[in-house]
Image (tube, rainbow, N blue to C red):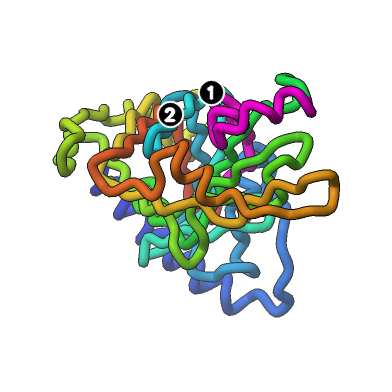
Amino acid sequence: MSKRFAALLSIAGATMAVLALMVSVAEARTPAPGYSQFAGCPSPEEKAEVEACFKTVIKSGNFKMGSKNVPIEKAITWSGGWGAALKVYNSPAGGLSKVKEKVPGGIIGLTGLTWLAEFLGIEALTLYATTELAGTPSAPLQPPIELPIKVHLENSTGVLGPSCYVGSNSNPIKLNLITGTTNPPPPNKPITGADPVLSISPENENIILLSNGKFVDNSFAAPGASGCVLTLFGFIPISINGLVNSQSGLPSAAGNNETTQVADTEVVESRFVYP
């Protein structure tokens, strides 16, 4: 697989050099027919160094930080492109899709404030976690895949305020996802992923499929929460970062956290997407 990708990237690199000389106006383009799923990949006008495009769909798994374990029940899409440096770039249509995953225990489980149910009702206290990029990832080509993220904690009634996060751009949660067996610090035990199945798309021989890869990491640390604010009576803001941290076991040192992500990935040379 690595030799084939190297050949593909070499050919794509020569193609990009020619295109860079021809392009005079820097504007985004629409992918060619049959490649619309790669719209998250920058065109040569946006990022001349991009040589390959990808789309990954994280289908299932879990994400545990401290004492909170969130199942991945709704598919998360990650798309973009990379060049020789294997750093991912994306167009405005790419990156990580903002998918709200339901957090067990809701707002009360997160804060311990049981009296909120009397004012808002249990249904209004549903809690969601949305994973967002917090830096530049590495290409989903050769593990370990470096994925810096932050987790946005949200509620439909705004109980936590608009900016309640675990992790930030300056202090991200740094995932290093592998398909082999981890070697975490205690008390975590090793867990094992699975290599994806490599094939060629039956609809398009230019597209390489990497199916049912199981990516794991249980060696990362998680910082404390920030920006979590409870507004009483509609106008009295009170910081509840301490409550969120104490109820969630945050910050959480390496060896206490875990993620498993089962994903399908499509890969293609950029020259086919943007001929």
The location of residue 271, given as percent across then percent down, is 54, 55
Image quadrant containing the C terminus: bottom right
Residue located 75% across and 41% down the image = 158
**Mark 1 Cα-neighbour bin, 10 Å: few <14, some 14–19, many ≥20:** some
Count of number-bearing discs = 2
Residue located 48% across and 54% down the image = 167
256 versus 260 height, above or below: below
Tell me if I can see residue 144 in this picture: no
Q: Is residue 215 left or right of residue 135?
A: left
Residue located 53% across and 23% down the image = 104
Kindly identify the amino acid type of the residue bearing the numbered disc 2: Asn
| Residue positioned most to the right | 234
Q: Which is more N-terminal, label 1 or label 2? A: 2
Of residues 198 and 105, which is closer to you in this image? 105
Of residues 33 and 156, which is closer to you in this image? 156
Tell me if I can see residue 169 in this picture: yes
Q: Is residue 116 magenta?
A: yes
Identify the residue position indicated by label 1 in the image.
104
Q: Specify start and end residues of the magenta stretch as a single range.
A: 96-120
The location of residue 24, given as percent across then percent down, is 70, 79
The location of residue 11, given as percent across then percent down, is 40, 59
Q: Quadrant of residue 108?
A: top right
Q: Secondary structure at mark 1?
A: loop
- Give the numbered dot on residue 69: 2
- Distance from disc 2 to disc 1, alpha carbons, whole Å, reads 8 Å
157 versus 19 height, above or below: above
Q: Is residue 246 magenta?
A: no
Cβ atoms under marks 2 and 1 closer than 8 Å: yes
Residue located 46% across and 61% down the image = 136
